[in-house]
Image (tube, rainbow, N blue to C red):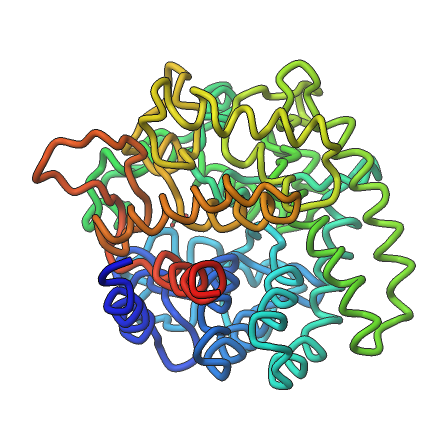
Amino acid sequence: MKNIEKIIAGAKMVLEDNWRFNHTLPSPKVYPFQWNWDTAFIAIGYANFNIERACGEYRSLFKGQWKNGFLPHIVFWDEAKSTEYFPGSSFYDFSRSPNVPKTISTSALTQPPIHAFALEYMYSVSSQDQRIAQLIKELFIPIFNYHSYLYKNRDPKHEGLIYINHPWESGTDNSPVWDDILTSMKPLVPDYDIPALRKDTRHVNFAQRPGNYEYQCYLFLINLFRKQNYDDAAIFENTPFAIQDPLFNALLIRSNESLIKLSGLLGFDDKKDEIRSWNERSIRQLNTKLYDHEAGVYNYFNLKSGKSINKLTSSCLIPLITGAPEKNQIESMIGLLTGSEFSGEARDLFLCPSYDSTAPDFDNKRYWRGPVWINMNWLLIQGLKRHGHIELADRIIRDSIDLILENGFFEYFDPKKEQVSGEKHGYGSDRFSWTASLLIDLYYNHLKS
Ligand code: DGY
């Protein structure tokens, strides 16, 4: 593949430019702090060429962990940047909770629990580097405490399935999955002056970001949680938004599996039984409650309405990273990936769009409503390889690399292969950290070998 060495050098440069004293910014203008699941995808890239950074990145994220095990989605390292991002630390006012860390401010939402899986992966691609082993020793209990927090506080019916309380907790902020719930919240949502408050649209075309009404809802929910002093039981009682999400739960299951594997290796055997019993329940419920036999794919469950949400997103395929799906379930998901939904009528789409391309509300430019995201591709590649679907994994690797080579290190990409010449098909932030870091990982671990 021509130019690839040059592009890898460019990817390392992006990470270098986005590095600030103890963490890497997802992108300096739009996301000027440390983000939770970005940290994992960024550290995975670093584990291939700069282990000190990979470890530093992770140690910094966990400095933001709350006393009850909660792991926030943003750590606000540089308060001076607070005027450049909205909603910043003052909007969250997280100190209303008795659980917050003393020395650093954070958000009060979380993100998908990828960390044990990421650390196990980093340990393996670094050929079991002792510095990563040491990092895992330090973070094993904090991650165990985070999972324990989730099972205690986000699983009110003790089903083994965790609910998210905000679209931002899914990692797929403006997915069409949330539309109906957000619309039904209308009478509750106050009229914030969103265009004046938002900072993201100063840097990214509005047509590529969530809409203003969605932002009203995002703020309304944070405000509601703030009023409950971030007490989970009170939030559950009062929130209109409580969703069991297939991506969040699949990553939790995959991370539990990693904790079980790592526990023996690192001398945390006493936790194994508890993690196993969490995971058995979670896998059973993922495969029953969240599995839609008719559609042949995992879906979402709205705990407030007591109903499933049957919109087809790439999150619905992420359970492939676990051992949960049976052969027929895997085949049916492969059918969707290679069918018109994700590959296009005439195979005219790059894999993998974030939303069903045949749906009327598919939007090839707007954030999580259609564009391809490299982190989702990376997860799908791991899942497909796990289940022996190497050819399809290779196709996703090639598509990911082509998109980056043609467009640059964008945050997300247009899935449409046929493009108007001269138009850029990378959207959102340019020089986006996880696009760069995951390209580095794809190069070292999936192309070179
Ligand atoms: C943003 O700011 O757009 C994030 O996705 C939410 O933290």
Residue 219 x/y as whole percent:
43, 41
**Which residue, as the protein is rendered here, is positioned at the far left?**
422
| Total count of labels | 0
Residue lying at 65% horizontally and 66% vertically, measured from the top left: 120
Residue 115 x/y as whole percent:
62, 61
Residue 434 x/y as whole percent:
40, 59
Residue lying at 64% horizontally and 85% vertically, measured from the top left: 130
Q: Is residue 46 above or below residue 283?
A: below
Q: Quadrant of residue 227?
A: top right
Which quarter of the figure is the N terminus placed in? Answer: bottom left
Q: Quadrant of residue 358?
A: top left
Residue 336 x/y as whole percent:
53, 25
Q: Is residue 286 above or below residue 5?
A: above
Q: Nearer the viewer, residue 29 or 115?
A: 115
Q: Nearer the viewer, residue 182 or 237?
A: 182
Q: Quadrant of residue 70?
A: bottom right
Q: Nearer the viewer, residue 33 or 264?
A: 264
Residue lying at 38% horizontally and 51% vertically, measured from the top left: 87
User: 6 left or right of 215?
Assistant: left
Residue lying at 55% horizontally and 24% vertically, measured from the top left: 335
Q: Nearer the viewer, residue 424 or 80?
A: 424
User: 162 left or right of 86?
Assistant: right
Q: Is residue 306 above or below residue 91?
A: above
Q: Is residue 128 above or below residue 284?
A: below
